[in-house]
């Protein structure tokens, strides 16, 4: 499979290869694709982003609870402490 790269992208590849960090363009592209996969794995889905927005709204309204109190309530409920 052949790929056509823009002159700007080709220059970036050549510059990276000149650093000696990569033995070949294939190795560089493979590393870049691995990094992209890793970044995508940590992207948040819409449901999580919505939950974060709701939490931020609750914080702004002062609907905040102390973690130690919540932890103690959960322990009491689940562990009978």
Image (cartoon, grey):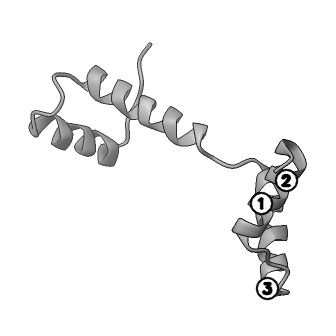
Q: Residues within 10 Å of mark 3 (few under 14, many from 20)?
A: few
Which picture quadrant has residue 15?
top left
The N terminus appears in which quarter of the rendering?
A: top left
The answer to whether residue 35 is left or right of residue 75 is left
Residue drawn at (71%, 67%), measured in percent from left and top?
67
The answer to whether residue 64 is left or right of residue 19 is right
Question: How far is disc 3 from disc 1 in space, using C-alphas?
Answer: 24 Å
Q: Residues within 10 Å of mark 1 (few under 14, many from 20)?
A: few
Which picture quadrant has residue 65?
bottom right
Question: How far is disc 1 from disc 2 in space, using C-alphas?
Answer: 6 Å
Question: Any mark on residue 72, and which?
Answer: 1
Residue drawn at (77%, 60%), measured in percent from left and top?
72
Q: Position of residue 16 (x, y in %)?
A: 19, 40
What residue did someone put label 3 on?
60
Question: Of the residues under marks 3 and 1, which one precedes in the sequence?
Answer: 3
Q: Position of residue 31 (x, y in %)?
A: 35, 29
In the image, is residue 29 above or below residue 56?
Answer: above
Which picture quadrant has residue 19?
top left
Q: Position of residue 47 (x, y in %)?
A: 83, 51
Front residue (pair 39, 57): 57
What residue did someone put label 2 on?
76
């Amino acid at each position: 499979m052949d790929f056509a790269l823009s002159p700007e992208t080709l220059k970036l590849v050549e510059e990276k290869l000149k650093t000696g960090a990569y033995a070949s363009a294939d190795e560089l592209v493979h590393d870049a694709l691995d990094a992209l996969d890793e970044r995508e794995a940590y992207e948040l889905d819409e449901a999580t982003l919505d939950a974060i927005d709701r939490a931020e709204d609750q914080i702004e309204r002062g609907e905040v609870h102390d973690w130690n109190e919540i932890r103690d309530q959960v322990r009491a409920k689940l562990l009978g402490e």
